[in-house]
Structures are given as structure tokens and as C-alpha cells.
Amino acid sequence: MLIQTRQPIPSSEITDPAVFRQRRTLMKAIAALAVGVSAADTANARPRNWLALPSGGPQTVGLTATPAELMLNYTNYYEFAFNKEDSTRLAQRLRIDPWSVEIGGEVENPLSYRVEDLLKRFPLREYLYRFRCVEGWSMVVPWVGFALSDLLQLAQPLSSAKFVKFISASQPEAMPRLRQQAMLAWPYEEGLRIDEAVHPLTILAVGAYGETLPKQNGAPLRLVVPWKYGFKSAKAIVRIELCRRPPQTSWNRFAPEEYGFYANVNPAVPHPRWSQASERPLGSDFFTPRRRTELFNGYGEQVAGLYSDMDLGHFF
């Protein structure tokens, strides 16, 4: 199904074609530095040509990927560092081979899968999504992944399962801030309502820009929920639990008045310390006007029905 955006993408957000063409060279260099999966597993796990993957999400006409180098070097990964440059560098210490993810809790059939087995089992697609950070910046990323609902279905959720909890890796020997127990209560945890988790837009990503997902961006397996602020999309997932009640989440536990459980992108609900009415697309310069933020990050046509009976100012 082809879904058009309500607004044209301004020229300031469109990637220079020359930069876009160079992204594969750059990604290969980064992948060489960040390699953590063995050569044999990588060869077995990767499709022959990720760039030829079909689209799995709503194809937003005119939406163009942010230059890959911006996505690679502007990351929040607080297990490693509180600034974006150091987190990118230090995340290369993350061990991602071997890697498996468990699915348990309120399910009929608890499971554990190696990542390479997931890649063989589920057809991969490219999902071109706008990504909006609660800090007020945004980018457009061509993720590679599969629908989270496909994995949950294998575990056969019980009728008692109302929420889904995501738990990220805990590697104190590689993660300085985790070792110091700085800021958040580690490991990083996030959660969704189950109808949010099985929505077709919600994916587990294993790649981006046609390549294996870099470590600083959540390798080898991360959540992507495009209508919510970026911190909801947990990185380096090792366990998924289906729950009866809303799980506690890392940022909501740390500052509940600032980071709600739902965290839907909403320009009408400011963060206590800054407005959410507009955003700065990565790659724009000082003189480029900020982009007006859209409710649900522009995916309202697909997801607004999930919240039709809710006061989004209260359930932020």
C-alpha cells in the first residue's frame, strides 16, 4: 500500500545525491571496524543483497534517507558514554558474537533464538522511517528488519499478555557507565502495550542503509517504533517478556515527570525543559528553519486509532 505524507519534504532535508551514493563505501569501512559477528556467521546470516530488499513499511513519498555518516556518529548510548561521539567510539567494545534473544513471560511457547537463525527464518525488508529524538532532532533511516509481530506469534502469547518488555544487553566489562551504575538502573528496559508491539510499523532491526547494523546503533538486534521518541527503541535486545501489567521502563523510572511510558511524538506536549513543537533534521545548517514536528511523527494515519480514547496530554 502506498501512503503519501500530508506535507512535502522540504529541500533542506533531501540528501545530496553524491553523499547518498558514497554511503555504502562509508558503511563498509565502519562495518570493518565494528565487526563482531564471525565471518562464517555473517556469510550465513546476510541475504545476498540487502539493497534489493522489498519495502516493508509505508512508503512515504519524497522521504529521503539522512546521510549515513550522521546516523553513525550522532548516537545516544548511555551504557557507554553521555556524549554522542564517545558513545559511538566506545560501543565498538560491545561483544555481539554469539548473540541470542529469549522470548518468555505470558506465552505458551517460550523461545530462544540466535540472531543468525532469526535472519534465516524471517524475510527481511527495508523500512524507511523518520526517527525523532526527544532531544529535538530527527533523521530518516532506511532500517533493515522484520515485523516484531512475526516473532511474538511464534511464542504464542497468552490472553493474559497485555504488555511487552524489552531488556537490553548488560556487559559491564564493555560498558563504562553501566559498570559505574551511572544515571539509569541498568540493564536498559523499555516497554510497549501489546497492540503497539504487534502493529505493522513496529519492527526489530538488524541493519540500516543496506548493511549490518553498526554496534553504536543497536547491533545486532534493536527495536524500532517510528511514532514514538527514539529512547523507546531499545538497542542490543537480549530478552523480550510478555507481561500482564505495564513494565517499568528505564527513563520513566528515572524521571517519570519527564519521560512518560507512551512517549508518542507529540508537538502539543512539551518536555518539562524544552518545547517539542519543532525539530532539527540532522544535516541541516544553522540557517535552516526547524521542521515542524508532526503528531505521532507523521504516522498518525496508521497509529492514531490505538489512542482514540486516551488523553495524550495525561498519558504522554
Image (cartoon, helix red, strand yellow):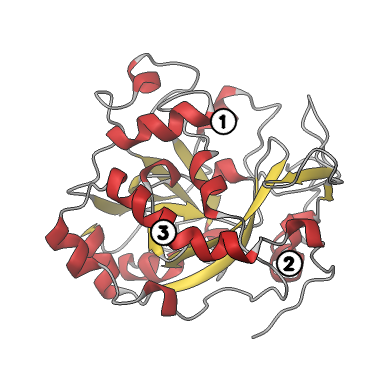
C-beta proximity under 8 Å, tags 1 and 2 = no
**Residue 167, position in %: x, y?**
38, 41
Quarter of the image with the C terminus is top right
C-beta proximity under 8 Å, tags 1 and 3 = no
At a point 69% along the width and 49% down the height, the residue shown is: 264
**Residue 25, position in %: x, y?**
41, 59
Toward the viewer: 202 or 274?
274
C-beta proximity under 8 Å, tags 3 and 2 = no
**Residue indicated by mark 1:** 251
Q: Earlier in the sequence, mark 3 or mark 2?
A: 3
Q: How far apart, in angstroms, are the residues tagged by discs 1 and 3? A: 36 Å
**Residue 133, position in %: x, y?**
65, 42
**Residue indicated by mark 3:** 25
The three-letter code of the residue at mark 2 reads Gly
Q: What numbered label is drawn on residue 305?
A: 2
Toward the viewer: 103 or 96?
96
Q: Is residue 131 above or below residue 80?
A: below
Quarter of the image holding residue 53?
Answer: bottom left
At a point 76% along the width and 77% down the height, the residue shown is: 4
